[in-house]
Amino acid sequence: MAEDINNSYLTNGVIATLQVIGGKWKPIILYILLTEGTKRFGELRRMIPAITQGMLTSQLRELERDGMVVRRVYQEIPPKVEYFISEHGQTLSTVLNDMCGWGFYHIEQKKNKEKQDQPSH
Amino acid sequence: MAEDINNSYLTNGVIATLQVIGGKWKPIILYILLTEGTKRFGELRRMIPAITQGMLTSQLRELERDGMVVRRVYQEIPPKVEYFISEHGQTLSTVLNDMCGWGFYHIEQKKNKEKQDQPSH
DNA sequence: GTACTTAGTACGCTTTAGCATACTAATGAA
DNA sequence: TTCATTAGTATGCTAAAGCGTACTAAGTAC
């Protein structure tokens, strides 16, 4: 019988992925940049009204650190900063789409189960 | 231009998935049950030495609540409780494998980049 | 010189996740 | 009668994630 599975292949791969796309706002940010291309900081902020400026900054910095997005600064006043998905970041789209597909399948299953549990009324 | 992306299709699907498999120990637990089949509580505990009893209980309860694992209680003393992946839980294996694949690809990319940044020494 | 703009930073707070340790119930074996 | 066994629960702690509000720099337009 296998012992101490902590360092197993699958486990570490999944955790590495979760570290990159985990966090409340990262899937949203990645989705926007993947589907709509380059965006300025302020544009992202307006597209995700519920996020605070500090959170947006920190999430973008982490995505940049992990090589998912590129930050391009224009030396202008007022400042202009653009964010876009890196080449490596593009490879995430398959995973995100799969997760999206499964997530919706799961939501449907839950709905069906609730109907079963409470058939009429 | 799209506004308020919070309720977008992809975003919600990904978040639903993260809610099910997110959390420090859930990928490990799911991996064990997916690859090795039914396990007793104590077996899981021994296979994941770093987890505390309370955490293992709470994670298993959440996975059960989300319909990923089934908890089978034997009316014996000392207690015997078995956990195994539900039919619906089986559908997770594709997603987990994809995430695993991408995670390892990502780790490799990082290694290569570090080598580039510091070629000799 | 005052106001407006953008992309932030700084600070302190609340909430959630995770951890450590001790305790429990019910039975059979010694 | 005491001990060992299993699958938990209870309690309180620390650490991390996330939030709210206020502030900043540096230039342009008025």
Image (tube, coloured by chain):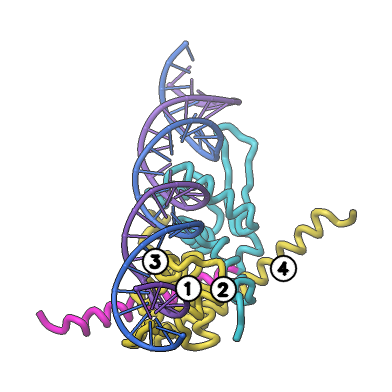
Chain colours: A yellow, B cyan, C purple, D blue
The disc, 4 or 3, on the residue closer to the chain's N-terminal end is 3
Q: Which residue is mark 4?
A: A108
Observer-side mark, 1 or 2, equals: 2
The disc, 2 or 3, on the residue closer to the chain's N-terminal end is 3
Query: What amino acid type should be assigned to the residue bearing mark 2?
Result: Met
Q: At 89% across and 56% down in the image, what residue appears?
A: A120
The disc, 4 or 2, on the residue closer to the chain's N-terminal end is 2
Quick check: C11 above or below B80? below
From the image, which quarter does the C terminus of chain A lie in? bottom right
Residue B15 in view here:
yes
Q: Are marks 2 and 3 on the same chain?
A: yes
Q: Which mark is residue A12?
A: 3
Q: Is residue A50 left or right of residue B50?
A: right
Q: At 71% across and 62% down in the image, what residue appears?
A: A110
Q: Chain of mark 1?
A: B
Q: Chain of mark 3?
A: A
Residue A91 percent across, percent down from the top left: 45, 84
Q: At 65% across and 57% down in the image, what residue appears?
A: B67
Q: Which residue is mark 1?
A: B99
Query: Which residues, given as a range, are shown in magenta?
Result: B92-121
| Residue B119 forms part of the magenta stretch | yes
What separation in Å lies between label 2 and label 3 (alpha carbons)? 18 Å
Disc 1, disc 2: CB below 8 Å? yes
What separation in Å lies between label 4 and label 3 (alpha carbons)? 29 Å
Element type at mark 1: helix
| Residue B60 forms part of the magenta stretch | no
